[in-house]
Image (cartoon, rainbow, N blue to C red):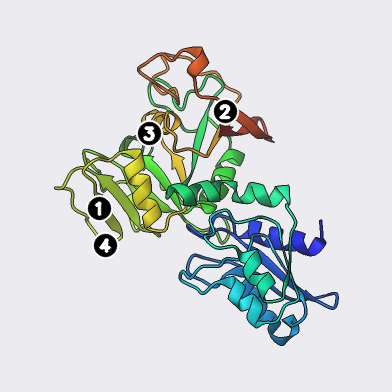
Amino acid sequence: MSHYLNYAIQLAKMVDGQTGVNPPVGSVVVNAGRIVGIGAHLRQGDKHAEVQALDMAQDQARGGTIYISLEPCTHYGSTPPCVNKIIEHGLKKVIYAVKDTTLESEGDAILQNAGIEVEYRPIEEAEALYHDFFISKQQGLPEVTVKVSCSLDGKQATDEAQSKWITNPQVKQDVFALRHNHDAVLTGRGTLDADNPQYTTRIENGKNPLRVVLSKSGQINFDLDIFKEPPQPIWIYTENKQLESPHSQINIKYLTQCSIENILKDLYQQGIGRVLVESGPTVTSEFLQSDFINELIIYYAPKIIGGSGKYQFFQTTEVTDLANVSQFEIVNTRMLEQNIKLELRKK
C-alpha cells in the first residue's frame, strides 16, 4: 500500500464517529514527491476531505495526485460534487481505496472524460471502515452498536438490582471512548430509574453524544441527574401525548408506535448516523432479537453472580430451536486488566 493512501485512511479513521450520516473520509494531495494538502471530512454539512485538501494545496495541486480513502462523490448535497473540485484543480491522477456503492453516477468515468487518470486500489482496512456505512445508507437507518457489561453468567445486576460496579474502571474508560465515537446513546426509562446514569464521555476533548430515552408510557422522573443542566440535548421517544418537556434542552418526540424501526428511522432522518445502545435487559433483548444491529460489544467481568437471572442481559419469552438461534462472529477480543472485551458482529 502507498504510504500516502495509508495517510488518507488514517485521517478517515481519526474522524470516524463524528460525521453523522456521512462517511468519514481522508485525503492527501501529493505533487513532485511532496504532500501539499491534507484534509478530512470533519462533520456533516462541512467541506468534504478532498475539498479540504485541495483548498490547502491551491495551485500546487495542478499536475499532482490525490489519494482518497473513499471514491470521490458525484452528487450535489450540502456541498457540490468532489469530482468537480478535482477537475477544476487540474490534477493528473486520483487514487482511492474503496468504491462507493451508494453513488448514483460513475465517478471514474467523469474524471477520465476530463483527462484524469483514475486508480482503484482496494484496501481491506478501509473497506472495513465503510462496511456498515453502506448498509446504513441503503436502509436509511443508523449504524447500531449494542453494549453490555456483565458477569461471566451474563448478569447486568444481582436479583436485588445491584450493578455498581460489575466491571472495572478500565471498562468505564473504554465505554467513554465508545460514546465519543457515536452520535447518540440510547437507553430505556427503566435503566434511568435503576442506575441514574448521565451518559457523558468524560475524556479529554471528548464529544458527548445525544442522549435518547425510550419510554412508551412517558412516566419520566425529571429529577434524575441526566436531566440536570444537560451538556447535550436529550430526546425522549414516547406514545404519551400528555408528556411535556420541563425545559428546551429536552425534546419530546411523539410516535404512534415506538418500535425500534420507527425510532431508528426518525434518528437517521435527523442526521444521527451511529447509535450506541446502553440499556437494561428489556431494550437490549429487543435489539438483539431484531435485524437492527451491526455490532455487539460485551464486557465480561470474572465474576459469577447467580440468582434467578432477573437481570440476565438477554431474555426472551419464547424458546428458539437451536438450529434457528441468532449467530454472531467474534471479530476482536481484548483484555482490560482482568475484564474481557468481546466485539461481535451478527451473521
| Image position of 185 (left or right of 260) | right
Disc 1 marks a residue whose amino acid type is: Ile
Mark 1, residue position: 252
Pair 4/1: label in front = 1
Residue at image mark 3: 283
CA gap between label 4 and label 1 equals 10 Å
Q: Position of residue 114 (x, y in %)?
A: 67, 76
Give the amino acid at mark 3. Answer: Val
Q: What residue is disc 4 on?
A: 248
At x 68%, y 84%, the residue is 58
Q: Is residue 133 above or below residue 8?
A: above
Task: Please rate how many residues cluster around mark 1, counting C-alpha atoms within 10 Å: few if below 14, some from 14 to 19, many from 20.
Answer: many
- Real-space CA distance between mark 2 and mark 1, rounded to the nearest whole angstrom: 35 Å
**Image depth: mark 4 or mark 2 in front:** 2
The amino acid type, in three-letter code, at marker 2 is Phe
Q: Secondary structure at mark 4?
A: loop
Left or right: residue 138 compared with residue 336: left
